[in-house]
């Protein structure tokens, strides 16, 4: 399962939600440019919020270091569709070396013991003293070897879709958008 990645677009706008919000922000009289900039900024901020929340909550759920999760999520602006944000997830398996591996008997496990790979071994790389690598032989011969990985695709995708479909997501999105519009209209005077 290599090169797994998922790109998820999110939109907090239903037709009725946008019309209700439009009536609420009309009191600030934003220009179209101000509104577009506020939407773009909100999309970026919400994406960053989801990225940080993913690292925090999936760390506990998967029993992995935060860095192993955090660097697999990217957020970026969408310039063509202003009402949507885009969130990218690199969901290849996490290499064992990022999970603080320890050799144990006939394989390698993580320090907390939550993951175990039968037949894997830890070795030092030739480039340095402290650089370790975890490999697993694919057959009985010395080579070829593979890098054992822990699959995170299903739990991460499930968690992310639950977050985006949660009612609090739309509430937080509109609260952030309203703040951005106020700042761009009233705050600039």
Image: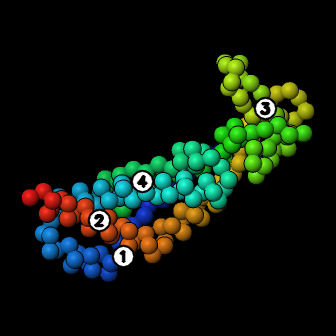
Instruction: Check disc 4: other Cα within 10 Å, few if <14, some if 14-19, many if 20+.
Output: some
Tag 3 residue = 122
Closer to the camera: disc 2 or disc 1?
Answer: 2
Point out the image quarter for the C terminus. bottom left
Instruction: Check disc 2: other Cα within 10 Å, few if <14, some if 14-19, many if 20+.
Output: many
| Sequence-earlier tag: 4 or 3 | 4
Q: Is residue 143 above or below residue 43?
A: above
* Quarter residue 155 falls in: bottom right
| Sequence-earlier tag: 4 or 2 | 4
Tag 4 residue = 48
Q: CA distance from mark 3 to mark 2?
A: 49 Å
Cβ atoms at labels 4 and 3 below 8 Å apart: no
Q: Residue furthest left?
A: 189
Q: Is residue 164 above or below residue 89?
A: below
Tag 1 residue = 14
Q: Residue furthest front?
A: 112
Dot 1: what SS?
loop
Observer-nearest residue: 108 or 7?
Answer: 108
Instruction: Check disc 3: other Cα within 10 Å, few if <14, some if 14-19, many if 20+.
Output: some
Residue drawn at 57 percent across, 44 percent down:
67
Q: Is residue 126 left or right of residue 160?
A: right
| Sequence-earlier tag: 1 or 3 | 1
Observer-nearest residue: 105 or 140?
Answer: 105
> Percent from the top left, x then y, of residue 182?
20, 65
Residue drawn at 76 percent across, 52 percent down:
114
| Sequence-earlier tag: 3 or 2 | 3
Looking at the image, can residue 6 be seen? no
Dot 2: what SS?
helix
Q: Which mark is residue 177?
A: 2
Observer-nearest residue: 130 or 143?
Answer: 130
């Amino acid at each position: 399962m290599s090169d797994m990645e998922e790109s998820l677009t999110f939109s907090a706008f239903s037709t009725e939600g946008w019309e209700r919000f439009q009536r609420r922000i009309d009191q600030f009289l934003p220009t179209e440019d101000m509104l577009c900039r506020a939407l773009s900024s909100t999309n970026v901020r919400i994406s960053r919020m989801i990225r940080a929340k993913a690292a925090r909550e999936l760390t506990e759920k998967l029993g992995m270091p935060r860095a192993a999760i955090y660097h697999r999520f990217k957020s970026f602006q969408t310039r063509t569709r202003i009402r949507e944000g885009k969130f990218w997830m690199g969901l290849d398996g996490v290499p064992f070396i990022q999970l603080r591996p320890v050799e144990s008997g006939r394989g390698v496990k993580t320090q907390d013991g939550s993951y175990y790979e039968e037949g894997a071994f830890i070795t030092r790389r030739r480039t340095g003293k402290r650089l370790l690598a975890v490999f697993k032989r694919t057959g009985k011969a010395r080579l070829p070897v593979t890098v054992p990985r822990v699959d995170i695709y299903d739990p991460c995708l499930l968690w992310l879709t639950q977050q985006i479909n949660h009612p609090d997501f739309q509430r937080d999105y509109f609260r952030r958008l309203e703040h951005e519009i106020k700042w761009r209209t009233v705050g600039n005077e």
